[in-house]
Amino acid sequence: MCSVISNLDRTGFPHILVHTGQHYSYDLDGIFFDQLQIRKPDFNLNVGSGSQGEQTARIIERSEKVMARERPDIVIVFGDSNSSLAALAASKMNIRVAHIESGMRAYDWRMPEEKNKRIVDHVSSFLFVYTEYQKQNLLQEGFKADKIYVVGNPTVDVIMRFWDEAKRNKIGTSLDLRRKDFFLATLHRAENVDDETSLRSILKALELVFREQGKRIILPLYPRTRRRIQEFGLEMPDGVEVLEPLGFLEFLHLEMNALCLITDSGTVQEEGCILGIPCVVVRISTERPETVAIGASIVAGTKPETVLKAVDLILHRPVDWSHPYGNGKAGERIAQVLKTYRPRSLIEEILEGALHDYRCRICFSPYLSG
């Protein structure tokens, strides 16, 4: 959101910034506002942690109160975390929703994120997608083309903006790391860390990678993942060096210099593709198949032997891909679309949507002729 916020500021588009407060420690919250030069939020919902139901309920309830007070024309939500479900409150209040990172599909219903992204897309008036592939996902689901905007990935904007600063960061020196001589790993997804079998399997995979490759594995560890490792009585394998959560600049510096990424994070998968760093995805599915198609990543699952083979395979591939995420102007394009928006009456949108659905039923129903 850093790129979008700065472009809204620059174009004079009046807006307020709402922080859900899902992350509340400095390492997972304040450091990003500081490093990415994001202004102080106008509201903090102080949602905190909790079960999926608890967190979702608090986000909807507390965001609704902010919307009732501010009466915005548009509510912008990003991604597929629970914070994006503020879109439900907006939709019920007949406020138009803009969804950034729309159209991603992993087709993996175990993931809470898969449910979130589909729900939010269906209540949104503006669908900002990163690639043509994501646009096709939406078209195949029956979305209207004039609601979809291919804008590129704002992650490219942010990497370009902070490239020099990240490159100068001293974390590599402090850890005595040599360029292309270490693996960088992350592990946080619920379907991996909340399942003892999956978590044990991934840790075993990291052990095999260290034994086979003989290179250090750096693992910044989320608090939730750390707790699960302790609860399941698991031990960190040899060769894996655990760090506290890192800031954006520190992590980007390590990504730039890593030999390979091993991760279950979709964003890290994107960043590796953008930076030209090969990535092994320890999941059975991905909502970013573009990176797989061009050879930048391999979806390896979680079985240790399969992960080991994927690492060996991707390290022998040439790094000759061009990323599909645009030229670093995504935030500018999003801001421009929103700035030129002119509200229509709600009844106009309802009637137009109803007519579109009626036409689709006539055209595609196998029970009608002519």
Image: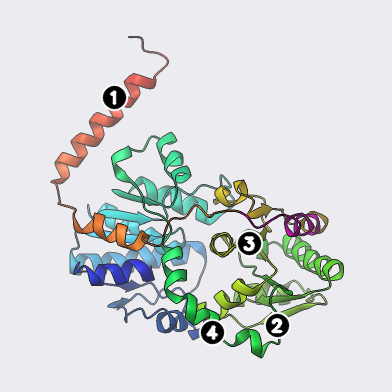
Which residue is label 4 attached to? 168
Residue 158: mark in rendering? none
Q: Which residue is mark 2?
A: 177
Q: Return the x and y of residue 326 as percentages of the image width and height.
A: 43, 55
Please, what secondary structure does the residue beneath circle 2 have? Answer: loop
Q: Quadrant of residue 353?
A: top left
Look at the numbered disc 4 and give the secondary structure of its residue: helix
**Numbered mark located on residue 264 in the image:** 3
| Location of residue 55 in the rendering, given as x and y in whole percent from the top left corner | 45, 67
Give the labeled residue for mark 1. 359
Q: Is residue 319 left or right of residue 109?
A: right
Is the magenta region chiefly helix, strand or loop?
Answer: helix
Calculate the distance from the C-alpha at mark 3 to the C-alpha at mark 4: 27 Å
Query: Which three-letter amino acid code belongs to the residue tagged 3?
Result: Asp
Q: Residues within 10 Å of mark 2 (few under 14, many from 20)?
A: some
Q: Mark 3–mark 2 contact, CB under 8 Å?
A: no
SS category of the residue bearing label 1: helix
Residue in the picture at 40% in, 13% down: 367
Question: Magenta residues, as a range?
Answer: 308-320
CA–CA distance in space, label 4 to label 2: 14 Å
Q: Position of residue 211 (x, y in %)?
A: 86, 70
Q: Which kind of residue does numbered mark 2 sit on?
A: Leu
